[in-house]
Image: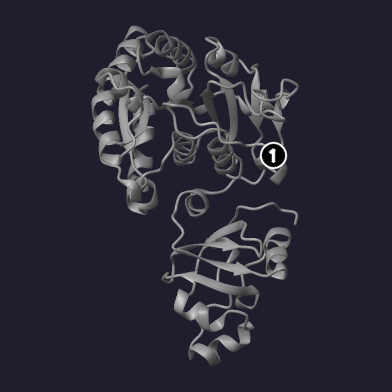
Amino acid sequence: MHRFKSILRSQNKIVVKIGTNLLADKVKGINLDRINEIARSVARFTAQGNQVAIVSSGAIGAGVAALGLKERPKTIPEKQATAAIGQPLLMEAYEHAFRKQGCTIAQILLTKDDFVNRARYLNAKNTFPVLFEQGVVPIINENDTVAVEEIKLGDNDNLSAMVANLIGADLLVILSDIDGLFSDDPAKNHEAELIPVVERLTPQIERLAKSSKSELSTGGMITKIQAAKRCVSAGIAMIIANGKNQNALDDIFSGTFNGTLFLPSDNKLNMRKKWIGFVSSAKGYVRVDDGAKNALLKRNKSLLPSGIVEVHGEFKVNETISILDLDSNVIAKGVTGYSSTDLGRIKGKKTGEIEVILNRKSHDEVIHRNNLVLIGEPTC
């Protein structure tokens, strides 16, 4: 774990995501003992000059217990109402636990719009340094009370990765009720082995992610791998560890732990590229041939119209679109220099033909490499 200890240098900025199954039981409600454990560990770490933000699930789970419901609600209005009841109970538990440690907390509720809208994204980003300067621990959750389907992020694994990108974190820690990523499903295969370090997110690693949704939580290993992709490409390390171990955070903060570490890419993206690749919503997509795929992934080239075989969706100039290969894998995202209408006319054409077809030429490139973020594998 020598590489991990180098990641945990002085003055760390860390996001800790805590899963519903660790915090809420549909009968007993909020697990106060675990929240107290988390507060003690985080308080000790912040006292050493580090900055910690917590992404906390559990609002709906707490609401389920408070209402005496037999199961998690199914419809959006029911979830919104249950979250409205559970969120203040959850925050009360955090406030009490951190106050005992001499720490102040802040509540931040976010929706997808707070990330996708560039102005709101920057406003949210500017809030965190002020809180950290005051020694405050932000407690973040999705704003389930107002989030309808169109603006829902859907799970706190991906929310935590987006927050890690937003604040420029060094590390994301996902505490769940599992030990980490295994070579197979340990519930079905007793010989499955824990994978301690993932150096690169290959398709083989992604195939190990299998849905394991529980009664109160959303997501599973699939969303954790999605979160890892958001992090490692942006130069942020990520750990999956079992939060039922009361020393889990202390072990991680000291540089030794039992779990799975996803090593960050050496090529750390700037803030704008983080937003393009892992925050902004794609308004449409183009499908490219193998030559264009090779140029993008292996040779760091811009996307030219000659490599585009299909255009889907309606989008304008300067909007984000996805780039898919012939097998429908998303290999990149970027800000397009042409609208979907114009791309439909120049797809498959050489750059020298653009002006003749459109009676104008804004750019040779459909997406310049400075406005493009790779999502897929660098080898193909």
The residue under label 1 is which amino acid type?
A: Ile
Q: Is residue 88 left or right of residue 364?
A: left
Q: Residue at x 34, y 17 (%)?
A: 94
Q: Secondary structure at mark 1?
A: helix
Q: Is residue 320 left or right of residue 64?
A: right
The reply to whether residue 198 is visible in this rendering is yes
Few, some or many C-alpha atoms within 10 Å of disc 1 (few <14, some 14-19, many ≥20)? some
Q: Is residue 342 left or right of residue 289?
A: left
Query: Which x, y percent locates residue 108?
Result: 32, 32
* In the image, residue 234 above or below residue 53: below
Splitting the image into 4 quarters, where does residue 43 fall? top left
Q: Residue at x 30, y 45 (%)?
A: 148
Splitting the image into 4 quarters, where does residue 27 fall? top left
Splitting the image into 4 quarters, where does residue 60 fall? top left
Q: Residue at x 39, y 12 (%)?
A: 31
- The residue where tag 1 is placed is 205
